[in-house]
Image (cartoon, helix red, strand yellow):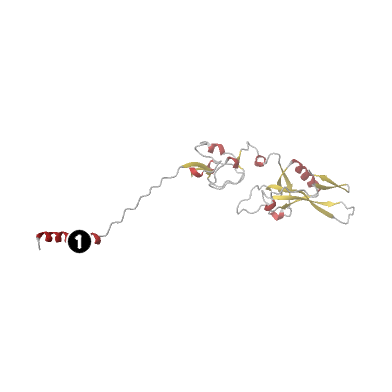
Amino acid sequence: MSPARIIILVVALVAGLGAALLIQRPSRPAAPAVTRYEPAPTVPVLVAAADIPLGNTVAANDLRWVDWPASSVPAGVLRKDETPGAEAEVIGQLARVALQASDPIRREKLIKTDGSGFLSAVLPSGKRATAISTDSRGANTAGGFILPNDRADVIRTFKEDTGNTNSENYTSETILTNVRVLAIGQNIQERNGEKVVVGETATLELDPRQVEIVAQAQKSGTLSLALRSLKDANDAGRPSEEGGMTLVRYGVTSRNVKQ
């Protein structure tokens, strides 16, 4: 064999052995790609630090700032970049609705009373708050299950003058429909898990003419409340028999038109 062929054979053998070694050598895994996450921009938003019941005065420890994603900040909330003095603005105001912890603070959920009472502050313009006597046993308030912010009908029960002293006839009629109950006794809010408080009075939200009707009806009979379903709470409703109220004076029955 010629020397040239021997050299070629040796080179081929060395190359084959090198290839075999490379095949048998375990390959190193590729380094994983590193993904960098940039934090989304946030905005400090004023929220309730604890539950704030309806009618409570907001204190400094009821508030805190929370970093909120700037892309999803709800409209109308108090932002530190827009109102740096928001805390001082809302401290001392009353909660118009119950606020849960971490709820964003909105101006429309609070109200300045300027020293006046809560009910006068939250009453809509043109409305009046009038209390009626109720039965402490719950007979006049749907067994005690009428709560603040429920809707109810007002029913008047009175004794008819039949001229017969040996018999007593009572008549009931609905004098107002779909009125809002503001409070039961001194209770103006129902809390989760709180027992129903049966008060001696129920405070109703009425217009001036309805106040006159209720005042007159209490003098001539007793008043009861009938709870309305939530499904028809938004119905305007209509008084019974064209809005009249039966009055008995000196044995003569007459009807007084309400509105």
Q: Which residue is mark 1?
A: 16
Task: Please state the horizontal and vertical placement of residue 103, each as a whole percent of the image.
Answer: 55, 46
User: Is 3 drawn above or below residue 120 in the view shown?
Assistant: below
Work out which quarter of the rendered image holds the N terminus and state it: bottom left
Task: Give percent across and percent down for residue 248.
Answer: 85, 48
Please give left or right for residue 251 compared with residue 203 in the image: right
Rate crowding at label 1 as few (under 14), some (14 to 19) or many (20 or more) other CA atoms within 10 Å: few
Residue at left offset 49%, top offset 41%:
44
Secondary structure under tag 1 reads: helix
Query: Along the horizontal axis of the image, is 167 left or right of 209?
Result: right
Image position of 258 with respect to 145: above or below: above
Q: Percent from the top left, x then y, of residue 253?
A: 87, 48
The image quadrant of residue 213 is top right
At horizontal 22% and vertical 60% (from top left) the residue drawn is: 19
Residue type for callout 1: Gly
| Pick the front one: 70 or 130 | 70
- Residue 136 seen in the figure: no
